[in-house]
Amino acid sequence: MAVQHEMRGDVVVVTINNPPVNALGKAVRQLLLELAEEFDADRTVKAVVLTGYGRVFVGGADITEFEKPLEPPYLPDVVARIEGASKPWIAALGGAAMGGGLELALGCRFRVAGADARFALPEINLGLIPGSGGTQRLPRVIPVDVAVRVVSENLVLDGRRAAELGLVDYLTELPVVDAAVEFARSAIARPLPTAASGRDPVHLETKALEEADARVRRSARSAAAPLLAFAALRTGLERGVEAGLEQERSTFLHLRDSREAAALRYLFFAEKAAPRPADLRDVEPLPIKKVGVVGGGKMGVGIAVALRNAGIPVVLADRDVPSLGRELNELRAIFAAAQKKGVISLADVEARMDGVSGTLAFDAFSDCDLVVEAVFEDLAVKRDVFSRLAQACAQETILATNTSYMDPRQISDGLVRSERFIGLHFFSPAQVMKLLEIVPTPETRPAVIATAFELARRLGKVPVRSGICEGFIGNRILKRYRADAEAMLSEGVAIADIDAAMRGFGYAMGPFEMQDMAGLDISFMHREAARARGESIPETPGDLLVRAGRKGQKSGGGWYDYAPGERTPLVSADAARILEAMLGARPKQLSAEAIVDRLVSAMAHEGQAILDEGIASKPSDIDLVEVHGYGFPRRHGGPMFRMSRR
Ligand code: COA
């Protein structure tokens, strides 16, 4: 049974037991409704304690049901029925009360929680708004301005904070159900407090509401759901709870069927599944207690930060004392910036630095379980690093390359015990970007691959396995994206039109602005190296710009011009002159939609080729790469998702 109950004297304890997260599926809703009727009619029951089995109270509505038509009983009715019960219902909250879980708890007259409880309304992450009264009851239980942050800005409250705000009536260190039963006994003797939906809003100030409105508009960027959630909340404050509930529900139902919500649900499940690939289910990962990082450029430093943020001790190696000193300073600067933003405390900064040691000699890696190489992209240099690592490290130490383009088989060719070798492609800045491409060679042993996935989970990364090809999944698609964008130039489409269209689609930058920011010279060098190897690579517009000294923002201009110290792209007559022979003879107007279609289809076609070649195992892996490594707008799901829904 998804909902069980047992009597404890005159208090009945109702336990939702619906693994994995006690989601409020149809069976749970049905049983809760029946029990609410039954207990109101049963004179031996004086109070009801409602809890969830295991580590989570309730993880929300059952997201898997959102693919199907709605089926009664509906959650708002269940919450309203519990709220209208003639006896006190007390939510006993350990662990997370997310979305519908919090809404259900708000339907109870009291809430008893442990400090480990967490309260959130994460519906906006799924392109939705709360649909069962969350936008209405919450601002009647906690101050309106905090409620807005929970509803529209992803604020999560822990048990302690929730108690300070009035959401939790009793904070306990005892097992929550025992404490809630005790609490229930005292509640029986008192009159029922007003139900949340019948109360007045808490600390409602018009000025604060106006400020919240402006803030939500800013933080929502182009997403619709946070603004719609705020609008429903506001309606309830201005026109009463009935009007608010009505607006909330109709907005929820409308959004539930939207393409954006479907895309976000698809990503939700893909992200949850990413760290646990089916073929590694029975493979035990190796322990990772300490990690070495070779090469302290921006990438090495970023990887070290990501590891320290996850509490893993790091040994950072570079070639000389000044370089090492610089890198340790950079590390400290990154932690200090996080402290300034209030993300970590001063003590955390020190603790994170204490867990890093610098070295010039690889001997210091002797007790590392993993060493990640992040040196310059040069085969001879990398091979030298690995042969020295093989001598300095224990036989079991996993050796990983962070190469973004090179064939890991060539890097590990001749390496002693090459079955412990793997590609771990982090994205820059590595402490921020969520994507980790995991690139095993045919020799890499399964336990090493499983360890890479487990490490990604610990670092909070989204891991995707890639087979071996130039650029792996992500950079291969990027190359195609850029090539198609450049092909449009030769047809006469303006650079600025292409960038504007992709920004309008949801990218932070268009393809040309992005190249100007990252620098045009790296891909130019790749092409030149391939040409030197005898490969036939046609001249590209980017080659012309780099040869003319236009390498992007860092050289004052690339595809665009930049005023000194500014990052705003300005249409460049100089670039147009250099590219004259390659640009279309006559200007061509393409709608933003046509530009987006062309470029996203190109990405999807390359993705399909990658799947056909077995480089990626499923379309959602390609979409995760694009969303987490290349800024593809989440609300469109990814190029493969978009293509499948046309
Ligand atoms: N409906 C259906 N399935 C859900 C779910 C939900 N609301 N929330 C989580 N799951 C599933 C996950 O997909 C995962 O499935 P899998 O094991 O098959 O991959 C499983 O439950 C465990 O989830 P996980 O996130 O790994 O567990 P956790 O213990 O780390 O975290 C939660 C639990 C509830 C905090 C977290 O899952 C969460 O935040 N869920 C989303 C809540 C949400 O958005 N609710 C609003 C719905 S409108």
Image (cartoon, grey):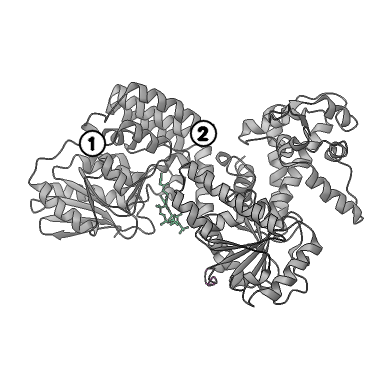
Q: For the stretch drawn in magenta, what is the main secondary structure?
A: loop
Residues under labels 1 and 2: Cα distance? 29 Å
Q: Give the residue at x 19% y 47%.
A: 89
Nearer to us in this view, 445 or 27: 445
The x, y position of residue 187, in whole percent, is: 12, 47
User: Image check: 632 left or right of 148?
Assistant: right
User: Image check: 352 left or right of 301?
Assistant: left
Question: Is residue 283 part of the magenta span, yes or no?
Answer: yes
SS category of the residue bearing label 1: helix
Nearer to us in this view, 343 or 526: 343
Q: Is residue 238 above or below residue 195?
A: above
Residue 223's disc number: 2
Q: Earlier in the sequence, mark 1 or mark 2?
A: 1
User: Image check: 408 left or right of 219?
Assistant: right
Q: Amino acid at mark 2?
A: Ala
What range is drawn magenta here? 281-285
Res. 263 image quadrant: top right
Q: Are marks 1 and 2 in contact (CB under 8 Å)?
A: no
Q: Quadrant of the N terminus?
A: bottom left
For mark 1, what is the residue? Answer: 196
Question: Is residue 468 part of the magenta span, yes or no?
Answer: no
The x, y position of residue 325, in whole percent, is: 64, 55
Q: Give the residue at x 28% y 49%.
A: 30
User: Image check: 112 left or right of 457?
Assistant: left
Q: In this view of the protein, can residue 277 be seen by the observer?
A: no
